[in-house]
Structure formats: C-alpha cells, structure tokens
Amino acid sequence: MSDRYEIRLSGSGGQGLILMGIILAEAIGIYDGKYVAQTQSYGPEARGGSSKSEVIVSDEEIDYPKAMKLDLLLAMNQKSCDEFFPDLKPEGTLIVDSTFVTQLPTPKAFQIPFTRIAREKFKREVVANIIALGTLSQLTPIVSAKAIESAVLARVPRGTEKLNRDALRAGIAAAKLAKKVWMNSEAVPEVPQEDLLDSY
Amino acid sequence: MSDRYEIRLSGSGGQGLILMGIILAEAIGIYDGKYVAQTQSYGPEARGGSSKSEVIVSDEEIDYPKAMKLDLLLAMNQKSCDEFFPDLKPEGTLIVDSTFVTQLPTPKAFQIPFTRIAREKFKREVVANIIALGTLSQLTPIVSAKAIESAVLARVPRGTEKLNRDALRAGIAAAKLAKKVWMNSEAVPEVPQEDLLDSY
C-alpha cells in the first residue's frame, strides 16, 4: 500500500454511511494500528439527502484529513456514483450497490447488490452497510476481516450481534465471488447477480 | 462569529464523543444550514482509551477540515483538558465536565458536572454527552437549541426520546446558570455545583 489510502463511502442519507465510516476507521485505527482520519461534511446541500463519509489511512500522522484522489469509492446510489467517480484514481477500486447503481462509469467496477441481499436474505435493509463493510474488508488491502468484525460488534446495538456478524460474512462471501469472477474475466467483471445472492 | 469556528470534543472512549460530534455537525449543517466538517482521528495511541471529535463550521466550503486553533474546547476528563488546552485560542471557550476535571488550566472555564447530573438525575451515565450538547447550544454562537434538539431526536434510539430531550434541557439549564454566575463574578466564574444539580 502507498503512504496514504483514501476511501469515500457515498449514497443517500439513511443508508448508514456515517456509521460505516466510523466502524471502518475504528477497525483500521484501533484494531489494525494505523493512523486514520474519518470525516463527514455537511453543507446547505445536505438537505437534499446525499450522504458521504471519508476515511484516510496512513502510516504516519495525518495532516490533511480530506480525500483528494480516491483509492476506493463505494457508491450506494446512482447519483453518488456519477458525482464522485471523477475523484477516483485510474487504478482505484469502485464498488457499487447494484441494487441502485445500474449505469456504470467504467466496466472495472465491483457490482454487488448490498441492499437486495439485506432485504431478501436478512429481511432488514439497514444491514446493507454492514454487508458492504464485509465486502470492503476483502477488496482493500488496508483492513482485515477480523478487525472489521471486532469494530462492528463494538458499535452495533446489543442483541443484534448475530444479525450483524451474518451480514458481515455475507459481504465477505459476495466479495470473494466477485473477485473470482473478476479474475476469470478479461476486463469486464460482471458478476451474475443471482450467484451473489446465493453465495453464502 | 468569524469565518471559521473550531470545536474539539474530548475525553475518554465510551463517553460518546463521536456521536456528540455527529449530532452537533448535523444540527449545524442540516438544520442551521452552514458548512460543517466533522472529523475523528485514530492512531496507535487510540488503544489508550482517549477519544476526540472535531467540528469545523464555516460560512464557506471547508477546504481544511482539521482544527488548528480552537474556539471551543469541551474536556470530559482531566487528561484531555491538560492535553488540548494549549490549542485553545486565548479568547476561546473552555467547558469541562467537573465530575472528572478538577485541576483547571484557567479560571475562565465553565465547570459543569455533566456525568454527575447524568448519574444522579437520570440514573443513566450515558446521557452525559447529550447534557453537554444542551450546554454547548447555550455557550456557542454557532448552533441553536432548536437545531440541536432536532438532530438529537433524529439520532438517538427509538423509545429514548423523552430521556434525551430531558437531558438536553438539563444541559441548557445548567449553562444558563453557569452564564449567570459568570456575569456576576469578576474573572473567576465558579458555579456552585449543588446549584447546577438543582437547576432544572
């Protein structure tokens, strides 16, 4: 990994992106022992219902905690995908919630139906963000699945541990399948959506 | 208010400072319509159990989301008070949780026993952060009590609205009393702690 790794989590208000950013930052900072800055910004436009959360990781103390060129972009809706894709480095990783993102700006995107998995497998749409965290732990070099699990379990309400652990594992399984499809394809990793739903 | 207003909320892990930062940022950004950046940083030292959360407010979009010279410092324990007081502007506002902060770096500090109020009046230590939010709404020019209340109610678990609304109001009442004592004193606003506990 380079000295600095920049992540933006984006989507709609209500998709739990801020909690996701906090859990991810705690997993990396507390459990994996790197320097992490986690930021959300609000402006007069925040009333529109867009939401984003940023996580910067570094081997050294972080002087400038705002993302400039993203190494990883998670887009949980079409609008945030369109808006933020230009900020992604050419070699950066794009992960989209294919429940809502249907027009891809690049064929090199990991498409995983987080919300659909949450809805159909868990009957709880709110765990889409936890499923996405499981996926992130497989598709970024900067956090371990173990650290993510510890951080999730420290943050979620008591009594929901099993649900959240299962959601995390569903995200990990989906990511593994997506990577496999990626490696078997040439440049266009299209993951069969049904396979993702059935993969765990 | 100046173009930029910098707040740091500090204390121990488990005192709810990150949630406090998020609620404060949402109150200012979404309900009061200014630009806000909210950041937490983690490093290898985070294992020690210290916690801090920063909120930057501006009339313009925020390029640099990290606090440099604080306008407001909330210190919920002695260690964070000692560590961060040097970052406060000379004319800045210091608010301490007098349950834990007993050695003041300046006589010009608002001393309010947030945790003791939470414990003795509400039998729930976890609402100390919400009481502190109520106090902040009175002691900073950058957020209204109404916006804070909306933001708190949007974030706290369902079923805890009354508890949190009451906690907020206790913080507002304590701040009003502290300000009154401040104005009646010369330079050393020492608030009788018992009066604060009985003030609402």
Image (cartoon, coloured by chain):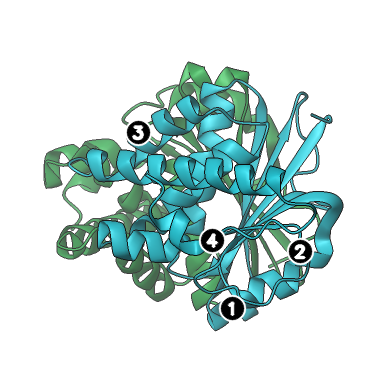
Chain colours: A green, B cyan
Query: Which of the pair B174/A109 is nearer the observer?
Result: B174
Can residue A29 be spotted in the picture? yes
SS of the residue under disc 3 = helix
Give neighbour class at mark 4: few <14, some 14-19, many 20+ (Cα, 10 Å).
Answer: few
Nearer to us: label 1 or label 4: 4
SS of the residue under disc 1 = loop
Q: CA distance from mark 4 to mark 2?
A: 14 Å
- Residues at circles 4 and 2 in contact by the CB criterion of under 8 Å: no
SS of the residue under disc 4 = loop
Mark 3 belongs to chain? B
Residue that extends furthest to the right in the rendered view of this protein:
B90
Give neighbour class at mark 1: few <14, some 14-19, many 20+ (Cα, 10 Å).
Answer: some
Mark 1 belongs to chain? A
Identify residue for label 3. Answer: B154
Query: Which of the pair B117/A155 is nearer the observer?
Result: B117
Identify residue for label 1. Answer: A33
Nearer to us: label 1 or label 2: 2
Identify residue for label 2. Answer: B107
Of the residues shown, which amino acid type is indicated by label 3?
Ala
SS of the residue under disc 2 = loop
